[in-house]
Amino acid sequence: MTNLSAWESWGVVLGLGLGTFLIRYSFIGLFANRDMPTWLSHGLRLIVPAIFAAIVASGVAIQAGAFAGWDYWPRYAAALVALAVALRFKGNIWFTVISGMASLHGFLALQRWL
């Protein structure tokens, strides 16, 4: 691992910030006065749920940089409960989050009891 000086670190931060800005601004500049194609609009609507699912899946299945294994079954079970609630009550994030948290705590208590 390489240690960066303060100037190099700030250069990385500023470069990443500029790159992120240019990526986001490119959509504003390209599509400011025109309608976005239907296929692109549909694809962009799916990005946020896909990112959220990837974050949640990695939080459920990864422990200390590796696959969590079946010792962490309460996490998997709670994720399945939250998924079922999300599919049943489409668009209601509160039911999904609360049911996921409650089932995780319930399954953890069950694991300690077993």
Image (spheres, rainbow, N blue to C red):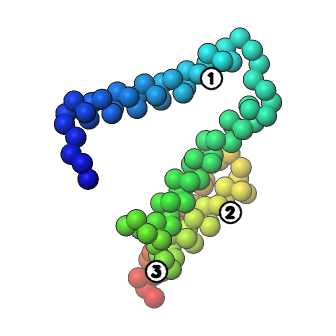
109 shown above or below 103? below
The percent position of residue 60, horizontal first and vertical second, equals 50, 64
Disc 3 crowd, CA 10 A, few/some/many (<14, 14-19, 20+): few
In three-dimensional space, the C-alpha distance between marks 2 and 1, rounded to whole angstroms, equals: 35 Å
In three-dimensional space, the C-alpha distance between marks 3 and 1, rounded to whole angstroms, equals: 45 Å
Q: Is residue 59 left or right of residue 85?
A: left
- Answer yes or no: is residue 11 visible: yes
Secondary structure type for disc 2:
helix
Q: Residue furthest top?
A: 33
Eye-nearest disc, 2 or 1: 1
Amino acid type, label 3: Asp
Q: Is residue 14 left or right of residue 70?
A: left
* Residue to which mark 1 is pinned: 27
Amino acid type, label 2: Ala
Q: Nearer the viewer, residue 1 or 25?
A: 1
- Answer yes or no: is residue 94 visible: no
Amino acid type, label 1: Phe
Secondary structure type for disc 1:
helix
Secondary structure type for disc 3:
helix
What residue sits 43% from the left and 69% below the top? 66
What residue sits 46% from the left and 80% below the top? 71
Q: Residue furthest front?
A: 2
Q: Nearer the viewer, residue 22 or 34?
A: 22
* Residue to which mark 2 is pinned: 84
The percent position of residue 76, horizontal first and vertical second, equals 55, 70
In three-dimensional space, the C-alpha distance between marks 3 and 2, rounded to whole angstroms, equals: 22 Å
85 shown above or below 16? below
Which quarter of the rendered picture does the C terminus lie within? bottom left
Q: Is residue 81 left or right of residue 13?
A: right
* Residue to which mark 3 is pinned: 71
The percent position of residue 7, horizontal first and vertical second, equals 22, 30
Disc 2 crowd, CA 10 A, few/some/many (<14, 14-19, 20+): some
